[in-house]
Each structure stands twice: as structure tokens, then as C-alpha cells.
Image: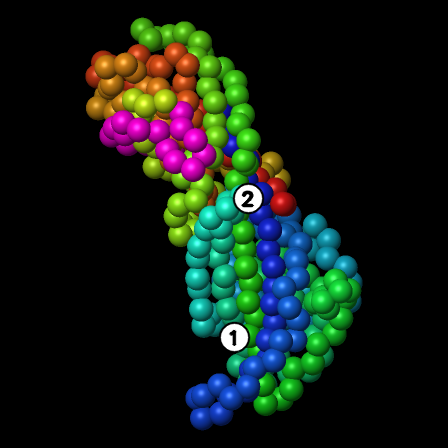
Amino acid sequence: MEYNIGFKGLFKIEAVKIVDGKEVSRRVLADWFPNLITDLGLNRIATAQDYLTYCQVGSSNNAPANGDTALGNRIAGTYTAVSIVTGTQSSTPYYAWVRKTYRFAEGVATGNLSEIGVGYALSGSLFSRALILDIGGNPTTITVLADETLDVVYEFRWYPKLTDDTGTVTLTGNIGGTYDWTIRLANATNGSGYGVVSAITFEPIIPCSGALAAITTCPSGAGNSGSAAAETYVPGSYEKYYNVTFGLSSGNFAGGIASCYGYAGAKYVQVGFSPAIPKTSNDVVTLRFKTTWGRY
């Protein structure tokens, strides 16, 4: 059973003058523009939560490439965050987001800048990289004055798949047989960006007696949670497998397990089964799920 997530990021850059601890002026050096999430970043998000820890700026004009691991000509880096806000877009395409504001102290990033990135180290280890773009989408150079503080806002988004996927799963044992499954988004308008700065996850898993629901809600009749165990991630695959287990006390409904739901990264997903899986307290059911991801 497979579910897909898309990733996207946007930058905004501002110069701030602070006098005696008070902000006296702020100017936008570059409004919202996109970045390239690197191969290194797509791998890092599979296993770690630190991929947005640092911001770096530089002066290279070399175009970003998937294989980039560092800025072309790094000038400065920072881990100082003055704001971290998460949320969920409440209308289609229902993405979850985190908006993090990094601050370079006065004098740290002074001069001409033309490239930017975020990552998990003060230098190199880039999760994303971009040339700084003007309002027309063209590469540009911005200038930070010696008495200015530099604020960089990075908005990172998780986009869930909005259409259903279907297939069949075959169980063995005393409830063995073939069951059709449908996987889809759940609670699309709900949440506050939970998990958006986490590694790829698929948990908790809640078995339900109710049928598959609309994408804006979740199945009814929730029971005791199952457990999810991740398999070892293969670098470069951009896919992660989970073995979801409903133990002896989980999912024992009179009509069977009709569905289940849980977090797949920053968004809920749900899976419906037809016919319902007729599990009892004598049975342990293990299902294998796969989460895949890429650039949006």
C-alpha cells in the first residue's frame, strides 16, 4: 500500500535595522521565490529531523543542481531562528507548511548576495539551494548594509496526494484471503502542520470499524492503535517501508477492520479494506505500507 508526498520551498529575504534592541526599519530585498530541494535533502528527510536547522548565504551565480551539497561561494551561515510557525492550507491542495525565520546578526552577512540555502550544518550539507530571484523570477544580487540585520524566511511545504490509489493485499493464516484496499488523504483541512519538520513517518495507525471516509474527515469507530516499524531506508530510493501491526488487543471489531488511518509525514492518510478484515483477539495482522516522496 503506497502513498506519495511532494515537497516545495520558498524564500523571502528582508534587511532590518535594529537600534537599542528595537526594530526601526525593514526592507524587502527579495520577495517569495522558489528553491531546489537537493538529492541530499530528499535523502536526509528520510531519517532525520534537522534538515532545516541552518541557513546559508553566498555570492555564486551558478544555477542550482540536484546534486548540490554546498553553496557555490558561501559567505555566512546561521542557526538563529527568531520565529517558527506551522500550519495547514485549508483548501485544495491542502498542503502542510512550516515558516521559519533565520536571523544573521548585524555585520555577519554584509555585502552582495546572490545565492541562498538551508540545511543541517553551518556549511555544506544543503537541504535546498536557490539563486536569489527578483519579482520577475530572474537571478539578481541583493546588498546588505553594514548596519543591517538579515532576516531570511523559509517556507517548507508538504503536499499530499489528492487522488486515491487502489490495490489488493493477500493475508495468510486463519483469516487469510485477498482484500481490496483504497488509500486516500484524510482530515485534509485539519491540523497545524504536525510533523512538517520531522522525518518521514507513518504513525500512529488507528484501526476503525467504519468505512473509508471523504478526504476532509477520517473513518469512524476508532479502536486501539497498532504499531509501525520502519524498515532500513535505502539512500537514493526516496521510498520508505513500514510494517504496521495490529496486535491481539487492536482492531477486534464485530464487523472486522473496515479501515485505518494515521500520519504519513505531515498529513493524515486513511486506508479502506473490502471486505473488512475479520480480525479477532486470536489474530495478529501485519500490513506493509510504503511512503514515497519527491519534488513538487
Label 1 neighbour load within 10 Å: few <14, some 14-19, many 20+: many
Rendered-image quadrant of the C terminus: top right
282 over 78 or under it: above or below: above
Residue at 54% x, 35% y: name it.
Answer: 162
Residue at 74% x, 74% y: name it.
Answer: 141
The main secondary structure of the magenta stretch is loop
Residue at 43% x, 37% y: name it.
Answer: 216
Between 240 and 235, the residue placed more toward the observer is: 240
- Highlighted range, magenta: 212-229
257 over 13 or under it: above or below: above
Dot 2 amino acid type: Pro
Would residue 295 be counted in the magenta stretch?
A: no
Q: Position of residue 29 (x, y in %)?
A: 65, 75
Q: Which residue is mark 2?
A: 93
Q: Which mark is residue 21?
A: none
Dot 1 amino acid type: Arg
Q: Which residue is mark 1?
A: 103
